[in-house]
Image (cartoon, rainbow, N blue to C red):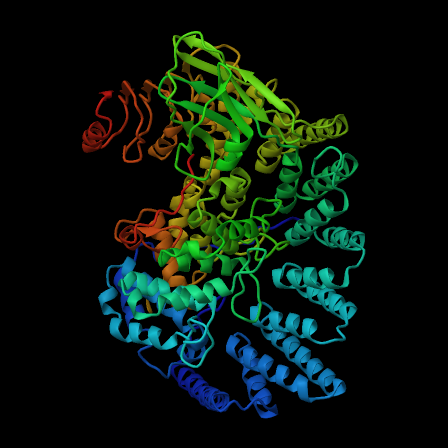
Amino acid sequence: MSFKTKDVVLSQTRPTTLLLQKHADYLASYGLNKDDFEYCMTEYLRMSGIYWSLTAMELMDQSSRMPKDDIIEFISLCQDSESGGISASNGHDPHMLYTLSAVQVLAMYDRSDAINIDGVVKFVVSLQQDDGSFFGDKWGEVDTRFSFCAVMTLSLLHRLDAINVNRAVDFVLSCMNFDGGFGSKPGSESHAGLIYCCVGTLSICKRMDALKVDELAWWLCERQLPSGGLNGRPEKLPDLCYSWWVMASLSMLNRIHWVDQEKLEQYILACQDSETGGFSDRPGDITDPFHTLFGLAGLSLLGNSSIKQVNPTYCMPQETIDRLRLEPQILLI
Amino acid sequence: MHGRLKVRTSEEEKVKKEKERQEKLKVFKHAMNVIQNKRKKCELDTEQLDVTGQVLTKNPDIYTLWNIRREILIVFRSNLSVMEMTKLYDAELSLTEYCLKINPKSYCAWHQREWVLMTRSDPDWQKELALCNTYLKLDERNFHTWDYRRFVVSQCKPDLQEEFNYTTEKLHDNFSNYSAWHYRSKMLLHLFPDKKGGRPIQDSHYKQELKMVLSAAFTDPDDTSAWFYQRWLLGAVKNITQIVVCTVTPSKVTIAINNSVSKSYIKEKIKVIINNHEVIGEWKSCLGNEYDDLWVLNHDQSIRNHLDIKVKHILVDNEMEVMRLSELKPAIYVGRNKISFQNKYSSTVLDELNEQLDACRQLLELEPDNRWTLLTTAFFLHCVDAKAYHKEIIDIISTLINIDEQRAGYYSDLKSKWCMEDNIQENYANLSLDYKVECKKLSSLPHLQYYSFCEALDLSNQNLTSRVLPGLIKLQHCKKLNLSNNKLTSLQGFPYLTLEELNITDNPLIENHVEQLRKKLKNTKIFF
């Protein structure tokens, strides 16, 4: 039995240029039909959906096509007055994931005043545990994703000092594995998405020194498959969103040149849908705003000049990060 | 949306499909309305359990609905009998199992299962472990199932040797099960740590694991999982924090460490003593960080000729290491440690490494271009004796740059690292303040803190790009820096250094960057 690498083959007829206007049109009309099945079924993550669409539009310099006032009002309504946290949508419960998305959106709009900032800080602080980890909400799920949400939310509000940063870092480091990567909690297997969260946490807390850089970056560059696409774990299929998780991590490690950038660009471009606009996980699949953002952000990291520069730690336009005077750490090489 | 293929359908089919979806949507919206209304009225009852359950079986990721169910179960707990609650908890477990069949990666459903087991008084952990075994047969890589297994194990505490054996079993089924290699690494550290030697794993097990990797890797060298595990095994050696070089000049004191340490470490463990008086002052990382490998102290001492300067370093076991500095030029004092980049292994492990190296060489005869065998051979050689095999190692890496173009950047930087290490060890053998890095085509500058004491450093004729520039901050005492004939395009990241001369001739530079750098380094003579 011979070993076969799991991968896809890019077709000859795939898109090879960036269909920028198509993507902007796709996102501008996404959710206009409130009875669209997909749109309704994804209400439980609406706040993140708004963040994906708005960030993508910002990167394409077309955010004026988004209903700014409605969005800001929606966010205000989603803040829970008791806990201070923000929910995915009206009628849903506050959660760390959607609190971050809301704060990111307001940071891009420069409208943090639309929510009760002290409330958000109180919410995040209340979820930190003695071991430095964070719950996602009061129900006690622990995950390094929530550590990242916590430090990113607070740093965007310039309130990082409200939590015990050293302990937050120690918890993340306790999730480091034999391969230099990170999983969702201590003992969990390395996964490119969670590596991004953990490296991002260390970048914001300026503790990148604690990484096993050579092992980690090697593992990350080995995610690239012959098609040019990246997978999230060994022996898995490529998926466009890993262009972001892997490449953003490698950017923070100052090693994006460890992958073949030209081939990756071909893969990302092949994930565009030339009819509907938007990007999908693999060529030929159905598109969605999530993969559309990570396709565009990935191209931005590769230096595509028709997309604005994205910040690898925050996955937001660099200009927003500059305006907020945030300086997440990037390693030297 | 992951893995959903776009299918072309006829207009007729489309209309039919849309009609079906609108029907489903109507049911969904109605149910959600019922739920929200009942919640507003604080109706925590069986009906609410039923409706939320119905919606969750279709979409287990609606996290709020699981929250509602927990609220209900908590209220029920104070009113219902133990037997009635047992029934309800069992039903909840069945619901999560049903949901996990629809979406085995639903965070919410997995968490609900954990919550139920932690909440009820009679959890059956053996049953849960059996469930993990079943699920891992269906998908051996689902990390949620593995996480859940670790959770169950943490509760029922089976003999960890059994868990270790389970990974052996899974790996013999399929060597490319990376999840099993991962779990194995955790079990190994728990079961066989080398407490006496301070190393991660006992020698005998070390050897056994290396053998296991080899049999996996040789089953099919293109299967990547085992190689990562092997790399970890090779790197699992004791690492000791060491001062590399200390420099004292009239303007500042710098201390370079082999790896990053915290500000409090420098403050508490390291003392600089001039003529029997400790130098007092605030240490700053050269980058302004809390952790760094190069620390700077701006002192107010007058540094003259013929001083007695030494550095004391309190080591882990409270032993004291004292390093005496020598005056290399009037009022320039440098103290350097004996350094080594060579990994140190016990003779048992070393014998095994040599044996495996031979096996790799044989394999290369059959398949000379296999990138995994090549890279492994290079690592074995490096682990056995980096200095003696330096040329062979570099030749292999150069071959890899051509064979595996996708990762050429990685191999170039690996070559740079190993060349730098070789070069630094040579340079440290003779005392000077003026060095030329005698490597070929460096693409990055690792370990630059080792050159922090230099007055002149020649980095010309390499492959350095602008990404290395911020790292030059490590050259805190440099006066003459030669970067000519490299691949610098931008100078934006160039740090503030008190250089007298900077040579950046023969670089593909953008013109106005030189002007900007002139403004930044006002007292530096720039050749471009």
Quarter of the image where the C terminus of chain A is located: top left
Q: What x and y, as percent, mark residue A64?
A: 22, 66
Query: On the picture, is B360 further left or further right than A167?
Result: right
Please tell me whether residue B234 is drawn above or below residue B154 in the rendered image.
above
Q: What x and y, as percent, mark residue B402?
A: 48, 32
Q: Closer to the camera, A317 or A307? A: A317
Q: Closer to the camera, B361 or A164? A: A164
Question: Is residue A273 visible in the rendered structure shown here?
Answer: no
Please tell me whether residue B215 is drawn above or below residue A43 in the rendered image.
above
Query: On the picture, is B476 further left or further right than A197?
Result: left
Please tell me whether residue A230 is drawn above or below residue B362 in the rendered image.
below
Query: On the picture, is B422 further left or further right than B469?
Result: right
> On the image, which quarter does residue B249 sit in?
top left
Q: What x and y, as percent, mark residue B171?
A: 72, 51
Q: What x and y, as percent, mark residue A270?
A: 39, 57
Query: On the picture, is B66 further left or further right than A15?
Result: right
Please tell me whether residue A54 is drawn above or below residue B282 in the rendered image.
below
